[in-house]
Amino acid sequence: SSSSSSSSSSSSSRSRQQSQGYQQSQSRTSQQQKKKAKADFGFDINDPYAALNLSRSAPLTKQSLSSAFRREMLKWHPDRYNDATEERRNYATERSKIITSSYQKLRK
């Protein structure tokens, strides 16, 4: 019984280390992807107004924000690209993540 608990604790320790290593590698990959994404998307991915195709001069209402979010997600939701190339599916996935993130930033 004690040997099974020690093997499970070393297993969970190993699991945590692998998870931390994975997160660090994902962080590096994420930073590289962000740099690449600016060029790929044609707009600054850190600008929520650009991601949702909203004008800064127009008043931002809850309705206009929701409408912009729905419009962009209907265009870029990854499920619409099931039959597309892997590159196009990945593009749609990244774009939908940016749209969702932008919506959450502006909603607050």
Image (cartoon, rainbow, N blue to C red):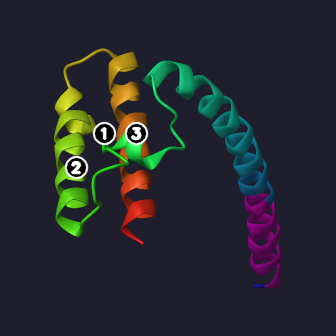
| Magenta run includes residue 73 | no
Q: Tell me the CA gap for discs 1 and 3.
A: 5 Å
Please report the residue visible at 38 percent of the width from the left and 36 percent of the height from the top: 95
Specify the farthest residue to the bottom.
1
Q: Residues within 10 Å of mark 1 (few under 14, many from 20)?
A: some
Q: Is residue 65 above or below residue 84?
A: below
Please report the residue visible at 52 percent of the width from the left and 34 percent of the height from the top: 44
Q: Position of residue 103 (x, y in %)?
A: 36, 57
Mark 1 and mark 2 in contact? Answer it, CB < 8 Å. Answer: yes
Q: Nearer the viewer, residue 107 or 74?
A: 107
Which of marks 3 and 2 precedes in the sequence?
3
Q: Which residue is mark 2?
A: 68
Mark 1 and mark 3 in contact? Answer it, CB < 8 Å. Answer: yes
Q: Which residue is mark 3?
A: 50
Q: Which residues are magenta?
A: 2-16
Q: Nearer the viewer, residue 23 or 92?
A: 92
83 displayed left or right of 94: left
Label 3 sits on what residue type? Ala
Q: Secondary structure at mark 2?
A: helix
Q: Position of residue 79 (x, y in %)?
A: 21, 37
Q: Position of residue 34 (x, y in %)?
A: 61, 34
Name the dominant secondary structure of the magenta segment: helix
Indicate the quadrant containing the N terminus: top left, top right, bottom left or bottom right: bottom right
Q: Which residue is mark 1?
A: 53
Indicate the quadrant containing the C terminus: top left, top right, bottom left or bottom right: bottom left
Q: Tell me the CA gap for discs 2 and 3.
A: 11 Å
Location of residue 63 by image quarter: bottom left
Label 2 sits on what residue type? Ala
